[in-house]
Image (tube, rainbow, N blue to C red):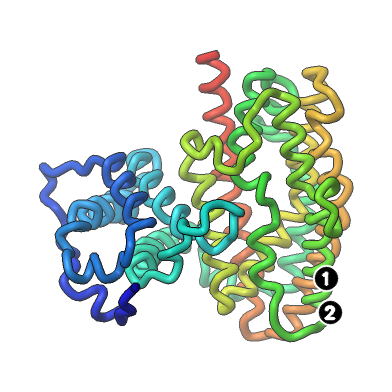
Amino acid sequence: MTVALSPDRMIKGISKELPSASQSPNYIEAEQQFIQLLTSENLDQQVSEQPERVSEFEAAIATALATAYAEDSEAGNAETEHLFLQRILYRINRLNLFWYDDLRHYKNERSYYLQWVRDRIEEVWQAWELAQLDVEQLRQLDTKQALIERGEADLNPPLTENKRYLQQQMTVEGYRHLLAIASLDGLVEASRLSRILGGASNEVQATLIRVLLEEYGNGRLTRKHSTFFAQMMAELGLKTEPEAYFDIIPWEVLACINHNFLLTECKRYFLRYNGGLTYFEIAGPSIYTDYMKAAERLGLSDTAMGYWELHIREDERHGRWMLDDVALPLVEKYPEDAWELVLGYDQEKWMGDRASAAVIQAVKQAEQSS
Protein backbone atom coordinates (compact mmCIF):
# COMPACT_ATOMS: atom_id res chain seq x y z
CA MET A 1 0.00 0.00 0.00
CA THR A 2 1.38 3.41 -1.00
CA VAL A 3 1.42 6.01 1.73
CA ALA A 4 0.31 9.44 0.48
CA LEU A 5 2.61 12.18 1.69
CA SER A 6 2.26 15.92 1.33
CA PRO A 7 4.77 17.72 -0.91
CA ASP A 8 6.16 19.58 2.11
CA ARG A 9 6.80 16.36 3.94
CA MET A 10 8.35 14.82 0.84
CA ILE A 11 10.82 17.65 0.47
CA LYS A 12 11.79 17.68 4.13
CA GLY A 13 15.23 16.23 4.59
CA ILE A 14 16.15 16.41 0.91
CA SER A 15 19.56 17.97 0.54
CA LYS A 16 19.85 20.93 -1.80
CA GLU A 17 23.52 21.46 -1.07
CA LEU A 18 25.82 21.59 -4.07
CA PRO A 19 28.67 19.09 -4.02
CA SER A 20 32.17 20.50 -4.03
CA ALA A 21 33.80 21.27 -7.35
CA SER A 22 36.07 18.26 -6.96
CA GLN A 23 33.09 15.93 -6.95
CA SER A 24 32.09 15.30 -10.55
CA PRO A 25 28.85 13.27 -10.72
CA ASN A 26 28.58 10.16 -12.82
CA TYR A 27 25.47 11.15 -14.76
CA ILE A 28 25.06 7.73 -16.36
CA GLU A 29 24.92 6.05 -12.96
CA ALA A 30 22.60 8.77 -11.64
CA GLU A 31 20.17 8.19 -14.50
CA GLN A 32 20.25 4.44 -13.98
CA GLN A 33 19.45 4.97 -10.32
CA PHE A 34 16.53 7.17 -11.32
CA ILE A 35 15.21 4.53 -13.72
CA GLN A 36 15.11 2.08 -10.81
CA LEU A 37 13.30 4.65 -8.66
CA LEU A 38 10.58 5.04 -11.28
CA THR A 39 9.31 1.51 -10.69
CA SER A 40 10.08 1.20 -6.99
CA GLU A 41 7.31 0.10 -4.68
CA ASN A 42 6.01 2.91 -2.47
CA LEU A 43 8.53 5.37 -3.88
CA ASP A 44 7.37 8.35 -1.83
CA GLN A 45 7.46 6.40 1.40
CA GLN A 46 10.93 5.04 0.65
CA VAL A 47 12.33 8.51 -0.07
CA SER A 48 10.72 9.92 3.05
CA GLU A 49 12.06 7.19 5.32
CA GLN A 50 15.45 6.71 3.62
CA PRO A 51 16.47 10.02 1.97
CA GLU A 52 20.03 8.74 1.71
CA ARG A 53 18.84 6.45 -1.10
CA VAL A 54 18.49 9.44 -3.41
CA SER A 55 21.25 11.68 -2.10
CA GLU A 56 23.70 10.90 -4.93
CA PHE A 57 20.99 11.34 -7.55
CA GLU A 58 19.97 14.68 -6.08
CA ALA A 59 23.58 15.79 -5.93
CA ALA A 60 23.87 15.05 -9.64
CA ILE A 61 20.72 17.11 -10.32
CA ALA A 62 22.09 20.02 -8.27
CA THR A 63 25.45 20.02 -10.05
CA ALA A 64 23.86 19.69 -13.49
CA LEU A 65 21.50 22.60 -12.84
CA ALA A 66 24.29 24.83 -11.57
CA THR A 67 26.53 23.96 -14.52
CA ALA A 68 24.00 24.02 -17.37
CA TYR A 69 22.08 27.13 -16.40
CA ALA A 70 24.69 29.37 -14.85
CA GLU A 71 24.49 32.94 -16.16
CA ASP A 72 27.86 32.69 -17.87
CA SER A 73 27.29 29.15 -19.14
CA GLU A 74 27.29 28.38 -22.84
CA ALA A 75 25.08 25.44 -23.85
CA GLY A 76 27.94 23.88 -25.78
CA ASN A 77 30.10 23.80 -22.66
CA ALA A 78 27.57 21.77 -20.67
CA GLU A 79 26.35 19.16 -23.16
CA THR A 80 26.50 16.33 -20.62
CA GLU A 81 24.53 18.25 -18.00
CA HIS A 82 21.88 19.42 -20.47
CA LEU A 83 21.44 15.89 -21.76
CA PHE A 84 21.17 14.39 -18.28
CA LEU A 85 18.54 16.89 -17.14
CA GLN A 86 16.44 16.59 -20.28
CA ARG A 87 16.54 12.79 -20.18
CA ILE A 88 15.36 12.82 -16.56
CA LEU A 89 12.55 15.23 -17.44
CA TYR A 90 11.51 13.12 -20.40
CA ARG A 91 11.33 9.95 -18.32
CA ILE A 92 8.94 11.71 -15.94
CA ASN A 93 6.89 13.47 -18.62
CA ARG A 94 6.27 10.36 -20.70
CA LEU A 95 4.22 8.96 -17.81
CA ASN A 96 1.52 11.42 -18.86
CA LEU A 97 0.92 9.31 -21.98
CA PHE A 98 -0.08 5.66 -22.21
CA TRP A 99 2.28 3.45 -24.18
CA TYR A 100 0.38 0.13 -24.08
CA ASP A 101 3.21 -1.37 -22.07
CA ASP A 102 3.51 -2.97 -18.65
CA LEU A 103 0.96 -1.33 -16.34
CA ARG A 104 3.45 -1.47 -13.50
CA HIS A 105 5.49 1.21 -15.24
CA TYR A 106 2.90 3.73 -14.10
CA LYS A 107 2.78 2.89 -10.41
CA ASN A 108 4.54 6.15 -9.49
CA GLU A 109 3.02 8.47 -12.08
CA ARG A 110 1.51 10.69 -9.33
CA SER A 111 4.48 10.48 -7.00
CA TYR A 112 5.21 13.61 -4.99
CA TYR A 113 8.90 12.90 -5.33
CA LEU A 114 8.78 12.72 -9.13
CA GLN A 115 6.79 15.93 -9.10
CA TRP A 116 9.48 17.56 -6.97
CA VAL A 117 12.26 16.42 -9.31
CA ARG A 118 10.36 17.64 -12.37
CA ASP A 119 9.49 21.01 -10.83
CA ARG A 120 13.02 21.58 -9.57
CA ILE A 121 14.50 21.08 -13.04
CA GLU A 122 11.77 22.97 -14.87
CA GLU A 123 11.97 26.04 -12.64
CA VAL A 124 15.62 26.68 -13.44
CA TRP A 125 15.51 25.43 -17.04
CA GLN A 126 12.47 27.46 -18.02
CA ALA A 127 13.91 30.67 -16.58
CA TRP A 128 17.04 30.02 -18.67
CA GLU A 129 14.97 29.40 -21.81
CA LEU A 130 12.95 32.59 -21.34
CA ALA A 131 16.15 34.57 -20.95
CA GLN A 132 16.99 33.71 -24.57
CA LEU A 133 14.12 35.97 -25.73
CA ASP A 134 13.28 39.64 -25.18
CA VAL A 135 10.00 39.01 -23.37
CA GLU A 136 9.38 42.68 -22.56
CA GLN A 137 9.68 43.58 -26.23
CA LEU A 138 7.14 40.91 -27.14
CA ARG A 139 4.66 42.43 -24.68
CA GLN A 140 4.71 45.69 -26.64
CA LEU A 141 3.85 44.22 -30.03
CA ASP A 142 0.58 44.43 -31.91
CA THR A 143 -0.16 40.74 -31.42
CA LYS A 144 -2.34 40.22 -34.49
CA GLN A 145 0.08 41.96 -36.78
CA ALA A 146 3.04 40.13 -35.26
CA LEU A 147 1.43 36.72 -35.78
CA ILE A 148 0.37 37.48 -39.35
CA GLU A 149 3.82 38.83 -40.30
CA ARG A 150 5.58 35.87 -38.71
CA GLY A 151 3.28 33.43 -40.45
CA GLU A 152 3.94 34.99 -43.86
CA ALA A 153 7.71 34.95 -43.31
CA ASP A 154 7.89 31.36 -42.07
CA LEU A 155 5.67 29.92 -44.79
CA ASN A 156 8.47 30.28 -47.38
CA PRO A 157 11.75 30.86 -45.53
CA PRO A 158 15.02 31.52 -47.39
CA LEU A 159 17.35 28.69 -48.36
CA THR A 160 19.83 28.43 -45.49
CA GLU A 161 23.06 26.46 -45.34
CA ASN A 162 21.35 23.74 -43.31
CA LYS A 163 18.42 23.50 -45.71
CA ARG A 164 20.82 23.29 -48.64
CA TYR A 165 22.72 20.49 -46.90
CA LEU A 166 19.54 18.49 -46.37
CA GLN A 167 18.33 18.95 -49.92
CA GLN A 168 21.63 18.53 -51.76
CA GLN A 169 24.21 16.70 -49.66
CA MET A 170 22.76 14.36 -47.04
CA THR A 171 23.52 10.68 -47.71
CA VAL A 172 21.28 7.64 -47.22
CA GLU A 173 23.04 6.90 -43.94
CA GLY A 174 22.40 10.46 -42.86
CA TYR A 175 18.76 10.15 -43.85
CA ARG A 176 18.42 6.99 -41.76
CA HIS A 177 19.98 8.74 -38.78
CA LEU A 178 17.60 11.66 -39.26
CA LEU A 179 14.60 9.32 -39.16
CA ALA A 180 15.94 7.55 -36.08
CA ILE A 181 16.17 10.84 -34.18
CA ALA A 182 12.82 12.11 -35.43
CA SER A 183 11.13 8.83 -34.48
CA LEU A 184 11.03 9.78 -30.78
CA ASP A 185 8.32 12.26 -31.69
CA GLY A 186 7.13 10.93 -35.05
CA LEU A 187 5.95 7.57 -33.74
CA VAL A 188 3.66 9.16 -31.11
CA GLU A 189 2.79 12.24 -33.12
CA ALA A 190 0.20 14.72 -31.82
CA SER A 191 -0.13 12.86 -28.52
CA ARG A 192 0.63 16.00 -26.51
CA LEU A 193 -1.95 17.99 -28.47
CA SER A 194 -4.62 15.68 -27.08
CA ARG A 195 -3.88 16.99 -23.57
CA ILE A 196 -5.38 20.44 -24.26
CA LEU A 197 -8.64 19.41 -25.92
CA GLY A 198 -10.85 18.83 -22.88
CA GLY A 199 -13.15 21.50 -21.50
CA ALA A 200 -15.72 23.92 -22.84
CA SER A 201 -16.74 23.68 -26.49
CA ASN A 202 -16.16 26.54 -28.91
CA GLU A 203 -14.80 27.18 -32.41
CA VAL A 204 -11.17 27.17 -31.23
CA GLN A 205 -11.58 23.78 -29.57
CA ALA A 206 -13.37 22.43 -32.64
CA THR A 207 -10.50 23.49 -34.90
CA LEU A 208 -7.90 21.91 -32.62
CA ILE A 209 -9.90 18.67 -32.65
CA ARG A 210 -9.97 18.76 -36.45
CA VAL A 211 -6.19 19.08 -36.49
CA LEU A 212 -5.86 16.16 -34.07
CA LEU A 213 -8.28 13.99 -36.05
CA GLU A 214 -6.31 14.47 -39.25
CA GLU A 215 -3.05 13.69 -37.42
CA TYR A 216 -4.74 10.53 -36.13
CA GLY A 217 -6.07 9.51 -39.54
CA ASN A 218 -9.65 10.17 -38.45
CA GLY A 219 -9.49 7.10 -36.27
CA ARG A 220 -8.05 4.75 -38.90
CA LEU A 221 -4.68 3.31 -37.90
CA THR A 222 -3.65 2.83 -41.52
CA ARG A 223 -4.06 6.57 -42.12
CA LYS A 224 -2.55 7.80 -38.86
CA HIS A 225 0.51 9.94 -39.49
CA SER A 226 2.67 7.89 -37.14
CA THR A 227 1.84 4.82 -39.25
CA PHE A 228 3.36 6.51 -42.28
CA PHE A 229 6.42 7.38 -40.20
CA ALA A 230 6.79 3.76 -39.10
CA GLN A 231 6.52 2.64 -42.73
CA MET A 232 9.36 4.99 -43.68
CA MET A 233 11.52 3.53 -40.97
CA ALA A 234 10.72 -0.08 -41.85
CA GLU A 235 11.54 0.59 -45.50
CA LEU A 236 15.04 1.66 -44.43
CA GLY A 237 15.57 -1.23 -42.03
CA LEU A 238 15.09 0.79 -38.85
CA LYS A 239 13.36 -0.34 -35.66
CA THR A 240 9.80 0.93 -35.41
CA GLU A 241 9.24 0.61 -31.66
CA PRO A 242 8.72 3.95 -29.90
CA GLU A 243 11.87 5.16 -28.13
CA ALA A 244 14.06 2.55 -29.82
CA TYR A 245 16.62 5.27 -30.56
CA PHE A 246 16.30 7.23 -27.33
CA ASP A 247 20.03 7.03 -26.62
CA ILE A 248 21.00 9.02 -29.75
CA ILE A 249 18.58 11.92 -29.20
CA PRO A 250 20.33 15.30 -28.74
CA TRP A 251 19.33 17.26 -25.65
CA GLU A 252 18.03 20.07 -27.84
CA VAL A 253 15.40 17.71 -29.30
CA LEU A 254 14.44 16.44 -25.85
CA ALA A 255 14.10 20.06 -24.70
CA CYS A 256 11.51 20.73 -27.41
CA ILE A 257 9.53 17.66 -26.37
CA ASN A 258 9.75 18.44 -22.66
CA HIS A 259 8.80 22.06 -23.29
CA ASN A 260 5.65 20.94 -25.05
CA PHE A 261 4.83 18.54 -22.24
CA LEU A 262 5.01 21.46 -19.81
CA LEU A 263 2.85 23.76 -21.93
CA THR A 264 0.14 21.14 -22.49
CA GLU A 265 0.06 19.97 -18.88
CA CYS A 266 -0.36 23.53 -17.51
CA LYS A 267 -3.52 25.20 -18.77
CA ARG A 268 -2.11 28.59 -17.78
CA TYR A 269 0.23 28.13 -20.75
CA PHE A 270 -2.61 27.44 -23.18
CA LEU A 271 -1.85 30.55 -25.24
CA ARG A 272 1.87 29.86 -25.38
CA TYR A 273 1.24 26.31 -26.57
CA ASN A 274 -1.12 27.40 -29.31
CA GLY A 275 1.30 30.08 -30.43
CA GLY A 276 3.98 27.43 -30.69
CA LEU A 277 1.68 25.02 -32.51
CA THR A 278 0.81 27.78 -34.97
CA TYR A 279 4.49 28.15 -35.84
CA PHE A 280 4.98 24.39 -36.05
CA GLU A 281 2.11 23.90 -38.48
CA ILE A 282 3.00 26.93 -40.62
CA ALA A 283 6.69 26.05 -40.87
CA GLY A 284 6.14 22.31 -41.26
CA PRO A 285 5.69 22.16 -45.06
CA SER A 286 8.98 23.98 -45.66
CA ILE A 287 10.87 21.68 -43.29
CA TYR A 288 9.31 18.51 -44.69
CA THR A 289 10.01 19.67 -48.24
CA ASP A 290 13.73 19.63 -47.40
CA TYR A 291 13.44 16.01 -46.24
CA MET A 292 11.38 14.94 -49.25
CA LYS A 293 13.79 16.55 -51.72
CA ALA A 294 16.61 14.67 -50.01
CA ALA A 295 14.73 11.38 -50.34
CA GLU A 296 13.93 12.05 -54.00
CA ARG A 297 17.56 12.89 -54.76
CA LEU A 298 18.64 9.66 -53.07
CA GLY A 299 16.21 7.68 -55.21
CA LEU A 300 14.26 6.32 -52.25
CA SER A 301 10.86 4.69 -52.65
CA ASP A 302 7.52 6.44 -52.13
CA THR A 303 7.14 4.49 -48.89
CA ALA A 304 10.46 5.85 -47.60
CA MET A 305 9.21 9.42 -47.99
CA GLY A 306 5.41 9.09 -47.77
CA TYR A 307 5.16 10.77 -44.39
CA TRP A 308 6.72 13.98 -45.71
CA GLU A 309 4.40 14.19 -48.70
CA LEU A 310 1.37 13.67 -46.45
CA HIS A 311 2.53 16.33 -44.02
CA ILE A 312 3.30 18.89 -46.68
CA ARG A 313 -0.23 18.55 -48.03
CA GLU A 314 -2.05 18.54 -44.68
CA ASP A 315 0.11 21.01 -42.75
CA GLU A 316 -0.47 23.69 -45.37
CA ARG A 317 -4.11 23.48 -44.34
CA HIS A 318 -3.34 23.11 -40.62
CA GLY A 319 -1.14 26.20 -40.65
CA ARG A 320 -3.97 28.31 -42.02
CA TRP A 321 -6.41 26.82 -39.52
CA MET A 322 -4.08 27.51 -36.62
CA LEU A 323 -3.54 31.14 -37.58
CA ASP A 324 -7.04 32.11 -38.69
CA ASP A 325 -9.21 29.88 -36.50
CA VAL A 326 -7.13 29.44 -33.35
CA ALA A 327 -4.43 32.08 -32.79
CA LEU A 328 -6.25 35.18 -34.04
CA PRO A 329 -9.56 34.34 -32.28
CA LEU A 330 -7.58 33.79 -29.06
CA VAL A 331 -6.14 37.29 -29.46
CA GLU A 332 -9.71 38.62 -29.35
CA LYS A 333 -10.69 36.47 -26.40
CA TYR A 334 -7.61 37.25 -24.28
CA PRO A 335 -6.50 40.79 -25.27
CA GLU A 336 -4.43 41.34 -22.10
CA ASP A 337 -2.58 38.03 -22.38
CA ALA A 338 -2.50 37.66 -26.16
CA TRP A 339 1.20 38.52 -26.32
CA GLU A 340 1.82 35.04 -24.90
CA LEU A 341 0.80 33.64 -28.30
CA VAL A 342 3.75 35.46 -29.86
CA LEU A 343 6.00 34.29 -27.03
CA GLY A 344 4.95 30.71 -27.71
CA TYR A 345 5.45 31.18 -31.45
CA ASP A 346 8.92 32.70 -31.11
CA GLN A 347 10.02 30.23 -28.45
CA GLU A 348 8.93 27.24 -30.54
CA LYS A 349 10.85 28.64 -33.50
CA TRP A 350 13.97 29.39 -31.44
CA MET A 351 14.02 25.99 -29.76
CA GLY A 352 13.14 24.23 -33.03
CA ASP A 353 15.99 25.93 -34.92
CA ARG A 354 18.38 24.99 -32.10
CA ALA A 355 17.20 21.38 -32.26
CA SER A 356 17.47 21.28 -36.05
CA ALA A 357 21.08 22.46 -35.90
CA ALA A 358 21.86 19.75 -33.35
CA VAL A 359 20.20 17.09 -35.51
CA ILE A 360 22.16 18.10 -38.59
CA GLN A 361 25.38 17.98 -36.60
CA ALA A 362 24.46 14.47 -35.39
CA VAL A 363 23.56 13.41 -38.92
CA LYS A 364 26.92 14.61 -40.28
CA GLN A 365 28.76 12.76 -37.52
CA ALA A 366 26.84 9.58 -38.36
CA GLU A 367 27.78 9.96 -42.02
CA GLN A 368 31.46 10.38 -41.18
CA SER A 369 31.51 7.28 -39.00
CA SER A 370 29.56 5.04 -41.43
Task: Out of 273 and 2, give the one closest to the viewer.
Answer: 2
Quarter location, residue 80: top left
> Circle 2 is placed at which residue position?
203
Residue 72 visible in the current orientation: no
> Circle 1 is placed at which residue position?
207
Q: Is residue 53 left or right of residue 356?
A: left
Q: Is residue 291 left or right of residue 42?
A: right
Task: Out of 26 and 113, give the one closest to the viewer.
Answer: 113
Q: Residue at x 37, y 51 (%)?
A: 85
Query: Percent from the top left, x then y, of residue 67?
Result: 27, 49
The amino acid marked with disc number 2 is Glu
Q: Residue at x 27, y 41 (%)?
A: 29
Q: Residue at x 67, y 22 (%)?
A: 170
The amino acid marked with disc number 1 is Thr
Residue 246 visible in the current orientation: yes
CB of mark 1 within 8 Å of CB of mark 2?
yes
